[in-house]
Amino acid sequence: MRHVERGTRKSIFGWCMYDWANSAFTTTVMAGLFPLFFKQFWSSGVEATTSTARLGLGNSVAGIIVALCAPLLGAMADKGTAKKRFLLFFAFMGVFMTLSLYLVSQGSWLLALGLYVFATIGFSGANIFYDALLTCVAPEKRYDFVSSLGFAMGYLGGGLLFAMNVWMTLRPETFGFVDSGAAVRFSFLTVGVWWAVFSIPLILFVKEPRAGAVSVGTHMIGAGFRELKQTFGEIRALRSIFLFLLAYWLYIDGVDTIVRMAVDYGMSIGLESNDLIVALLLTQFVGFPSAIAFGYMGGRIGAKCAIFLAIGVYLFVSIWGAFMHTKQEFYFLAIIIGLVQGGIQALSRSYFARIIPADRSAEYFGFYNMVGKFAAVIGPVLMGGVGLLVRRSGFSTDTASRVSITSLAILFIAGGLLFYFVDEKKAKEEVRQLTR
């Protein structure tokens, strides 16, 4: 086996820079401009609840596809020691699809949604292998810090590009665009280029161990299926890991849904698009130092306590969000979300990395991402479905939208209760006994 030294500055830098790269998609496309443009340009003339349901369905379809493929892809990557190759394949699929959004004309909501779905599949698929590479670049004692640093870099990088794209959208004439629509379409091009260019440090500096001969082609697929079957059986036997995945499935669903649907929700209750963009920028730049702070907090009070704190904050947000009316209240909630969003994601990743076999990280992170993507199926559909149900019961669109956001509280409560019963020491002992 080729020895790979963990914890080198170059490898950690290269790994963290991929978060800087792909977070441009999260901010500018997924959370920011795509929901706005989808509602105002590609779905113009359509009732707000209908466009919300369409966007929710698109996010859910992407989540289902990634969820179904993630465990097999992880098993194949571990068997062939090909995490980086799989990461780059999905990343550049996402890059190409994002660039293609520039070409979609007004009213072509189905084509725009299709490209968005495939771009999201590329983004999410690459993250399976990016998460798994954490065990290759950092020693266990630094998982919390390195994982949090990656998210912090993502907030900063994604926030910087998003700020530039917002500037272009608000002042299109400054950049030579005829209107804001042209600036938004150009923003999709900047995301694709940013994503591709800043993936280069990961390509150059992140190494993964290579054991024996590398399987290729159908041999890798066959080996992947065999490993998948074995790992699935193990996870069912490893009660603590199974319980964590179930808890994570529920609470991260609420987190992902808020990320993807916040702008759409704000527009549905009558807030101005410019105000929503400012709120997203606040979340990004508050999230940078907060993610790093959560990394240190995980080392001081434990990752589990820090995750519980974040779940409690999100529960508050999901309830208070139904009662807000002013942009100042939306800004306040954006700041609160920024304080915990990166922390709950980073520490969930490092907590899981700590309780799984490090030499089979892609397989286990395949299941980790699978439940995360199935969670992204439930959340948007739950929010969109509740909104449609309330609307068809005779209530106003505003009331329907407000009720829909409170449905997410169920996910945070259930996820937090299950996570309470997860024990890190017991999980490690179960892994040791199973792998003897």
Image (spheres, rainbow, N blue to C red):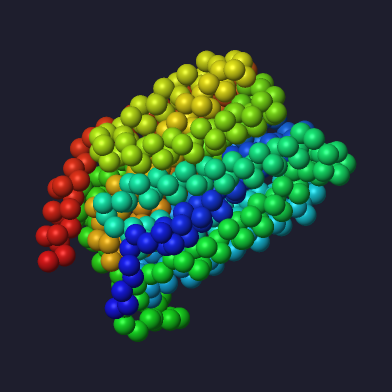
- Residue 363 percent across, percent down from the top left: 34, 63
Examine the rendered structure and indicate whether residue 312 appears above or below residue 240.
above
Q: How many marks?
A: 0
- Pick the front one: 112 or 178: 178
- Residue 367 percent across, percent down from the top left: 35, 56
- Residue 333 percent across, percent down from the top left: 51, 24
| Residue sitting at x 66%, y 61% | 96
Examine the rendered structure and indicate whether residue 301 appears above or below residue 14.
above
| Residue sitting at x 15%, y 54% | 430
* Res. 400 visible in picture: no
| Residue sitting at x 56%, y 64% | 200
- Pick the front one: 229 or 170: 170
- Residue 103 percent across, percent down from the top left: 77, 54
Q: Is residue 241 found left or right of 95 in the rendered image?
A: left
- Pick the front one: 23 or 157: 157
Q: Quadrant of residue 197?
A: bottom right
